[in-house]
Amino acid sequence: MKTQLLQSNNDGINTAADLLKKGEVVGIPTETVYGLAADAMNVDAIKKIYEAKGRPSDNPLIVHISRFEELEGLVTNIPENAKLLADKFWPGPLTMIFERKDTVPKEVAPKLNTVAVRMPSHPVARAIIEASGSPLAAPSANLSGSPSPTTALHVMNDMDGRIPAVLDGGECDVGVESTVLFVASGKPRLLRPGGITVEQIEEVIGEIDIDPSVVSDIFTENVASPGMKYKHYSPKAKVIVVDAKDNDFALYVNRFENEESIYALCFDEDIDRLNIPYLAVGSKYAQGDYAKALFSALRDLDDKGAKIIYAHCPEKTGIGLAVYNRLIRAAAFKVVTPKPYCILGLTGTTGAGKSTLSEYFKSLGGYIIDCDIIAREIIDKKDIIEKLVSAFGNVLENGKVSRKALAKVAFSTKENTELLNGITHPAIIDEIKAKLKSRENLKSGLTVIDAPLLFEAKLETLCDVTLAVTASKDIRLNRIMKRDNMDKETALLRMNVQNDDIIYSQKATYTVLNEGGKEELISATNEIINDIGVIINGK
């Protein structure tokens, strides 16, 4: 099939209308985004929409009308608040969901007894509806899941060869899909934010409910509105939303300045702070600019070869709520809130690679509190030496505790290990608290509490997050023997008194399985650092 690009004149409008009358699908402009239009009363035509988009068949469509009178042929009842909203905002980017008449094909909203209806304000869209002689079902004219199209070129890029024609009506004014409001029964409920804001609606009909799915991935089995259930609006690049103040956003993304194919989607005010490539969407004080530029920007960044896009989160009010709603779906709900300061508890089974990560965090500028070092210092204190000798007998060499002798007896049974911990842990905890207190005025960076017995000593209560490193028993055994020049029997003694790996996966915020090389371990850890959002010494 060859897709025609029609102009928005009488000939183009009439050609589009003729195709629609024949049960075909046409890309048409609206003020929000371009729509993939078909006769809403023609079941075969509706099926062609789903086929062209690759759209899940249980995702409802919006029906477009050109006159208010057409609404009566589609719905069983028009509530008074819906009449007030239509009088104020139609034609315009507001969709309302009503109980549908049986004459409306169920394919418009599979598994539902409702229908979503709006009256577009774009003059070309309304002219096509009039010329076709029927309401038009029209979801966004993109491949399902990809960024919505705001120009005819976007539609051609996605739909060339899939539909017979696209009508070029210029760039869309709003840039995000319409607001969707459920008015069929009960208190009106916002299902999707858009060009008409919550504040504008409430000025007309009073307080409305906001569905939890607007700002999260919570949804029911049968969704009432498009844009609620599936990952939507996503470019080929991975999108991560960064919910941060201007300076924190820059500090967070600038860590990636030496990495390839990473871009910032940002405000004009961010530009001077950024050291990575970026695409600006306008001023943070002009939310409408972000909305208008969003989908085009995501497509442009794909064209630039972006692999990861860090998008600066807008304010979640006004049309900014609509932008946020689209961004979190484009990001598959991946949102990072950068932290200027974080205490991370690092633990894991011996030989798993905890020391490697501790050194890595140190290389990034992290402040490391090494509990092994503290433990060595602790057992040289007079009061601790006396307690150890009382508990385990003569474990001294030249007046000091022999770590080898202590280990042999203390790790011989779990009871002895618990006895050792009961002596040393309180002193270790006091020392850690003292070190943390000395840094309490430092409001940036990463502090790592490197503790093999993090959970046994209840040190996790001092941490913001915890990270455990694990590996299989055989791999750990070989590492310990090589690292500590230890025989197999002694290495097994040390390992056998430790927790099983499942304890770490149950208790730790994050767990890394380290059975590959150092590069794999560091790569997995970097993902966790990014997820935590800590800004390490401004890097």
Image: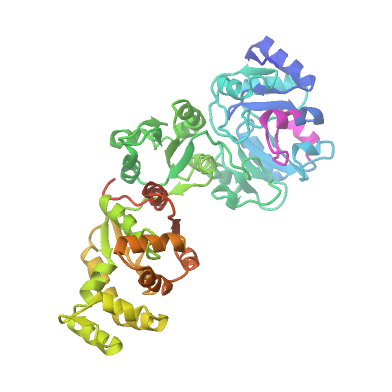
Q: Residue at x 68, y 30 (%)?
A: 138
**Residue 102: where, in percent of width, then height?**
84, 40
**Residue 292: where, in percent of width, then height?**
50, 30
Task: Report if residue 403 is visible in the image.
Answer: yes
Residue 51 counted in the magenta span: yes
**Residue 467: where, in percent of width, then height?**
40, 60
Check the image and name the residue furthest to the left.
398
Q: Nearer the viewer, residue 332 or 486?
A: 486
Q: Residue at x 72, y 30 (%)?
A: 51
Residue 419 counted in the magenta span: no
Q: Is residue 446 left or right of residue 20?
A: left
Task: Report if residue 469 is visible in the image.
Answer: no
**Residue 504: where, in percent of width, then height?**
45, 65
Residue 448, quarter of the rendered image: bottom left
Q: Nearer the viewer, residue 502 or 14?
A: 502
Q: Which residues are magenta?
A: 48-75
Check the image and name the residue furthest to the top.
11
